[in-house]
Amino acid sequence: MLSMKNLKLISITFFLVLIGCNENQNIHDYNLIPLPNQIIIEEGKLELNSIQEIITSLDSPRLIKATNELKNVLSSISNESIKICSDTNSSNISIHIKSNTSIEDKGESYNLSINRRGITLESPSEEGLYRGITSLKQIILISSGQNDTSIPFGDINDHASYSYRGAMLDVARHFFDTNDVKRYIDILSFYKINHLHLHLTDDQGWRIEIKKWPKLTTIGAEKEVGGTPGGFYTREEYHDIVNYAHDHFITIVPEVDIPGHTNAALASYSELNCNGISPEIYTGIEVGFSSLCAQNDITYKFLENVIDEISAITPGPYFHVGGDESDVTSKEDFIQMMDSVVLYVKQNNKKPITWDNNTKTADIAQYWNNESKKNVIGKSKEIIYSPASHAYLDMKYDSLSPYGLNWAGYTSVKDAYEWDPKYFSESLGEINILGIEAPIWTETVSNFDELSFLVFPRILGHAEIGWTNSKLREWDKYKLRMNKHIIHLKSLGINLKD
């Protein structure tokens, strides 16, 4: 005969199993990407038309902007006029957005509760509140996309798996203006990506104004791949991009690739060449043929000026210095230039990142191919994962893709989703995984529609890899959520692969 103690234990266990089944069966009902780390769906739905106000007393300019965006999204769906106020005693059905320092901050943590009284969003940090607002916008927009103006009752408890969740945009091969970059930022922030790495310089073009070296843009920015007109960002335009990204809780990571990938700089200034002769402007796509001159003192003055000017207008903590595919630079010269630049970046209070860490002075390496492994073991403290076979968005989907390359193979939407940074780190010992990044190189894309075809929907999978616990990620269930997001992206005029 069962004792009362054992009967109580069985009852509690059965109750928890029911909750677990409910959670597992309904975990995708909100259609969120990336998938939150915990969702508990409850009986009932909240009519969006019943929400009358957003209540918050937060004074953060960024969160005020985000709250106004949420209001506009809600108003467009519910056809109701929503007001924002600070009256916490209101009895109306409302959205409450508030700071709660009692919630453990595991990395952009937030709690979101939806019930008959309305919606409550809480977080210990500004970042967490913004990510929660983003989730709420997704729930509203994706639900409305299915002709439904109600959302399920439930609770979401969420946080990020990795602190660095990045995308990289190559504006050197083909130039993309500030409007294109802002449009990209809008979508990246919608999927909780929090870093945008701008590849600002390469053989084909120098894309940022440097006051002390004006010919970098008058000469070095003139063309792009194929010989079409190039372009560059003035300091004011770059500052505008940085601020726009900041408002969307995205950190800009500038890259000046050295000592190779520098033909645009070498063509602009003859004194940067060892022979004192400037090469022709280059508009092809081959790599590995250019190099700064390690023996010239002016090289180091040039690099210091560039780092100083870009660092001064980039408040984020990172500065990418390239360091890859410098095939015509001797090993001794390469190390001399890279060590010098890395140390100078640190003097500007920035954390240097390199593609392949062939120097012991850089703490963060960006892994992009198998060759990277031997260059980071024993040298790097942290890794950003961008395996070309899975994360390079410029790789073709298949042989029929109209854009892209295939030197790292073909990468289907499924391939882009089904990989795990921890798997890649097995042979790298105790190196910390800072996060992941999905680059788009632009040899074959010259406008936003062409870029979008390669990026979307693959980057949605990368967003989920960077945010969601790998144990919760399942391709078959993700695909169902992704298809709903494809409908939403198409409604925004985004050109993407079905």
Image: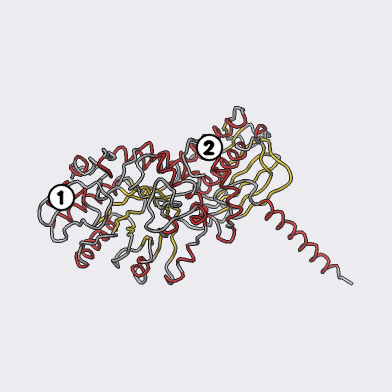
Which of the pair 85/23 is nearer the observer? 23
Residue 385 quadrant: bottom left
Residue 184: assigned label: none
Q: Marks 2 and 1: CB-CB under 8 Å? A: no
Residue at 18% over, 52% down: 302
Q: Does 246 appear above or below 469? A: above
Q: Label 1 crowding class (10 Å Cα cut-off): few <14, some 14-19, many 20+?
A: some
Amino acid under disc 1: Pro
197 left or right, relative to 467: left
Q: Position of residue 328 (x, y in %)?
A: 20, 61
Amino acid under disc 2: Thr
Residue situated furthest left in the rendering = 276
Q: Does 188 appear above or below 469? A: above
Q: Position of residue 240 (x, y in %)?
A: 35, 38
Q: Secondary structure at mark 2?
A: helix
Q: Is residue 259 visible?
A: no
Residue 164 quadrant: bottom left
Quadrant in the picture for the N terminus? bottom right
Residue 44 quadrant: top right
Q: Does 323 appear above or below 236? A: below
Residue at 37% over, 70% down: 377
Q: What residue is disc 2 on?
A: 67
Distance between mark 2 and mark 1 Cα atoms: 52 Å
14 left or right, relative to 283: right
Mark before the other along the chain sequence, 2 or 1: 2
Q: What residue is disc 1 on?
A: 279
Q: Position of residue 327 (x, y in %)?
A: 24, 62
- Indicate the colouring scheme: secondary structure
Mark 2 or mark 1, whichever is nearer to me? 1
